[in-house]
Amino acid sequence: MNLGWNITKSQQLRVSAIYNMARDAEFPALPMDLRNDDTWMFNMRHDFNINNEFLKSWNTTVFASFVDHLMDNHLKNLNPRMLNAETAANTYNYGGRTESVWRFSKSTLYAGGDLRLEGAEGIREREFLMGPNSGNILRDNAWQDSRISKTGLFCEYQLNTRVYQFVFSGRLELNNTDVIDPAPEFIREYSETEGTQINPSISMGASRSFNKGFKLGLWLGRAQRSGSLTEKFINYFPVGQDPYEIIGNPQLKPEINNQTDLALEWATDKTKVNIDLFASYLQDLISSSVDTNLSPRIPSSPGVRRFTNTDDAFKTGFEVSWSQEIAFGLQHLMGIAYTFAHDLGKDEPLPEIAPLDFVYTLRGSYFKGKLHPKATFRYVMKQSRISAEFGESTTPSFSLLDVQISYRLLKNMRLGAGVNNLFNENYYEHLTRSVRGGNNPIFARGRNVFASLNIKF
């Protein structure tokens, strides 16, 4: 029997940072910095090794996290300074998971259940310093003390035969949502905020190994999920990659993903290739679109986006990886990934889909594994498949080269140095493309030189 207990506390004071909680942030329509972040995390795990004829073990985990954070614009150099703003928010996430392991002559069964409860509350205060509202303080109920509980039962059955390996898995989840402190403007849009949804999910797959290192696998699955706290209950608050204010939708239908994957693997002593092809038919996809009937709370915001369901959508794509040991202590690795996604009802691309991404790495090992040089090249294609309704903008292609070298000085000590973005490419990722309604990009770091000393105790 093994009992483990772990408590960590993290408290950070920052002058300029971006706090990210479930992809939530404030952007230049009302720029704010993280001033204080107080996070508590708890985790306790119990392992019980039984080893009877079939039941082999039982493990249980209990976890919790509590975040208390404050954001404001007090240190922003604003000219003129129209208002002071701050947002204090508290979030929690706690629950538990228990799982048993059963072993039979040719199969293994994993079965158990879990419970997760999460919630958020937070008020944004805006103190007007100029204009007709000068001297007034307005309070926006951004999270409305919203809550979600998820109770689930799950199992996975693995069967090994002489030729095939089969995997069958399923999950049944009960999802309950509600708000304790609803805002009047939110109630005007949605009179009913409480909801209960049952989400079944199932998947099955089989793989087979062939001669000469080939392995082929086929997987089929149907997964269903309910909307998150943000998707259901955010209240006129910017939580995306642009300053559009977002309003949630407690009446969202569960999102359903019907997917098939075809996996091919080829491996020898020095080479390994993996190819994964996938296709997905999505029903009631949870997304968002601009609602011109709604007015934002911040005048400089370009508008309000509402979470909605997209009736039918399609995704397909591939991932390829290749690693090979070549001569003179060198090894190279290659990876490429691409996704094509389309809204079938509106006949336009789905939003927030990254373009084709290619990565090639060449690394070496010398002096009995002490010296390790490495160079990585990355090329990302232009993303021109964008959603006009979502307000996306195209993203240009870019190329990056990173180089680094490390040397093991002692058994437990390693010295390293390198340069990221060697040619100082001016670029930005598609999913961080803009902060002002699609006009100004968020550029990534330029050339970055670093050195490190790692010591293991």
Image (cartoon, grey):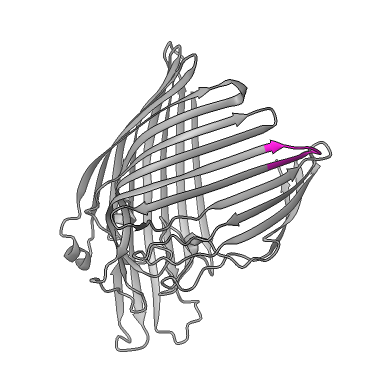
Question: Is the residue 331 above or below the residue 179 in the image?
Answer: above
Residue 268 on image: x %, y %: 66, 28
Residue 405 on image: x %, y %: 76, 50
Question: Is the residue 20 above or below the residue 9 in the image?
Answer: below
Q: Which residue lies furthest to the right in this view?
A: 367
Residue 244 on image: x %, y %: 36, 69
Quarter of the image where one finds residue 274: top right
Residue shown at the point (67%, 66%) measured from the top left: 424
Question: Is the residue 343 above or below the residue 76 in the image?
Answer: above
Q: Does the magenta stretch include residue 330?
A: yes
> What range of the chain is rendered magenta?
324-332
Q: Is residue 146 magenta?
A: no
Q: Which residue lies furthest to the left in this view?
A: 191
In-image side of 454 versus 83 (left or right): right
Q: Which residue lies furthest to the bottom in this view?
A: 131
Residue nearest the viewer, comparing 293 with 79: 293
Quarter of the image where one finds residue 32: bottom left
Quadrant where the C terminus sits is: top right
Can the viewer see residue 144 in this picture? yes
In-image side of 320 versus 130 (left or right): right
Residue shown at the point (36%, 88%) measured from the top left: 130
Quarter of the image where one finds residue 189: bottom left
Can the viewer see residue 145 in this picture? no
Residue nearest the viewer, comparing 428 with 343: 343
Residue 301 on image: x %, y %: 36, 75
